[in-house]
Amino acid sequence: MPLVEGLEITDVAAEGNALGRLETDNGQLVVFVPYGAPGDIADVQLEKKKKSFAQGRIVRLAKPSPIRVEPRCRHFGVCGGCRWQHLPYPFQLECKRQQVVDALDRIGKVEHPEVPMTLGSPLQWQYRNKMEYTFSNKCWLTFEQLNSGEEFPDRDAAGFHIPGAFDKVLDIEDCCLASDLSNRLRLFVRDYCKREGLPFYDLRANEGFIRTMMVRTLSTGESMAVIVVGENNQQAIKALLDAIRTAFPELTSLQYVVNLKVNDTIGDQEVILHSGRPYIVEEMEGLRFRVGPKSFYQTNSLGAYTLYKTAREFAALTGNELVYDLYTGTGTIANFVSRDARRVIGIEYVPEAIDDARINSADNGIDNTLFFAGDMKDILTDEFVAEHGRPEVMIVDPPRAGMHTDVVGVIQRAAPQRIVYVSCNPATQARDIALLNNHYRVTRVQPVDMFPHTQHVENVCLLERREVPLAEGEA
């Protein structure tokens, strides 16, 4: 593949890439470049090339962009997790705002008010309350290491999967998004297992002892560690967890999983309590939320408060409304808005999360919530709406894939006056809004940044029912 010298990086593109444009004999070629910044002049090695676009990487920065800032993380450019650390935070917020505008304009093709600036995260570093680490006997070697001529007999690693290499893990010394406790726990478990000769997991052979670890650290100061092993060696498990408990007495919850499956998911596995409580508690406006090892909770606690306040403001509840909270998780939004509603009905796929949602209501003395567990398209039916009542307001917070078309159909027939659509993926949100466009118009939009230094953005849209539905095909 050719080397393109002096390519000007002009814009930010999808998936956290930057882009430049190259004039060729066949027309203009768009070149996507990770870790570039608008204003860079760079020599770019093309690695993949199609008819109208190519993928490349910077091999020499001839003239750095004036907007560049120094990345904080020593692993920047290799880890792949924080592609925007070299961009100033206000510029990141503008890029995320533009991402929402582009999705509504180009994918949804719907009318909408002006999109305001993205609300920034109260914390820009150490904001993640949940980290998942992988242990592997196949450490990823950087280009510098490979070219050094050194031998690397110790290939054990504790860190993150390298993009595009499922069996390779980058050994992380310090993650700038994780809490200090999370970083210290990872290093302790890595060093303990090395010292005790406990084999790190082989992701190709599917064998080994130490496999993954999840660490949660909440704004209340409570914390949880879940150690996942690939061998049912009870003696080794007990010794490891005893050592963790001795070294980290501040842990609120210490649990483990014996996962003998091929994949790493623990949703269908038994989580066993070693010591402490089987859950930890987050707090928001005096409400306490129980979070278990399988519970979904927003990974940025302070950012979540900004997001939920925005959703509540858009819902404009007066105390008289029946609210449906779809994809409710552990019932955080449902309980958060319950004091302003007549009743809130929450629906969620994960049964354990619904158990937590019910407990959260009970613990907070909330008696106007009702929760159901099951696949959204199976639970939310016309019969369900007929039985439990037509909602005045619906709050929906689906996964990245957005809503199933059956769910969209039921929402349209239930005909709430307002829909508050919270999304972690503006593209699928825009697609779903287009499906609702004949009966609903977008009246408010607010992007919220939950993931500084990454390309991801949450977005909240308020959809209000049209007095007169649009004719088929109207914009």
Image (cartoon, rainbow, N blue to C red):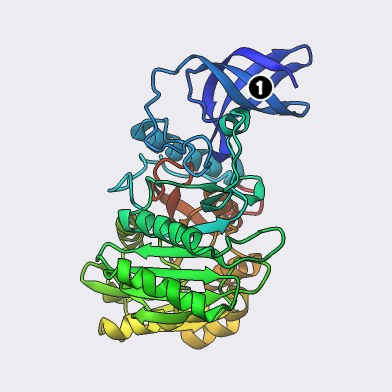
> Which residue is found at the position 40% from the left and 59% from the top?
188
Please give the residue where the numbered disc 1 appears in the rendered image: 45
Locate residue 258, reporting x and y percent.
56, 76
Give the amino acid type for the residue marked by disc 1 in the picture.
Gln
The foreground one among 302 and 257 is 257
Q: Is residue 259 above or below residue 163?
A: below
The foreground one among 37 and 406 is 37
Which residue sits furthest left? 286
Locate residue 132, reporting x and y percent.
48, 59
> Which residue is found at the position 59% from the left and 79% from the top?
381
Q: Is residue 222 visible?
A: yes
- Check disc 1: other Cα within 10 Å, few if <14, some if 14-19, many if 20+: some
The foreground one among 376 and 440 is 376
Locate residue 335, reporting x and y percent.
33, 75
> Which residue is found at the position 55% from the left and 69% from the top?
411
Query: Viewed as shown, does residue 164 lie left or right of 11?
Result: right
Query: Viewed as shown, does residue 62 lie left or right of 130?
Result: right
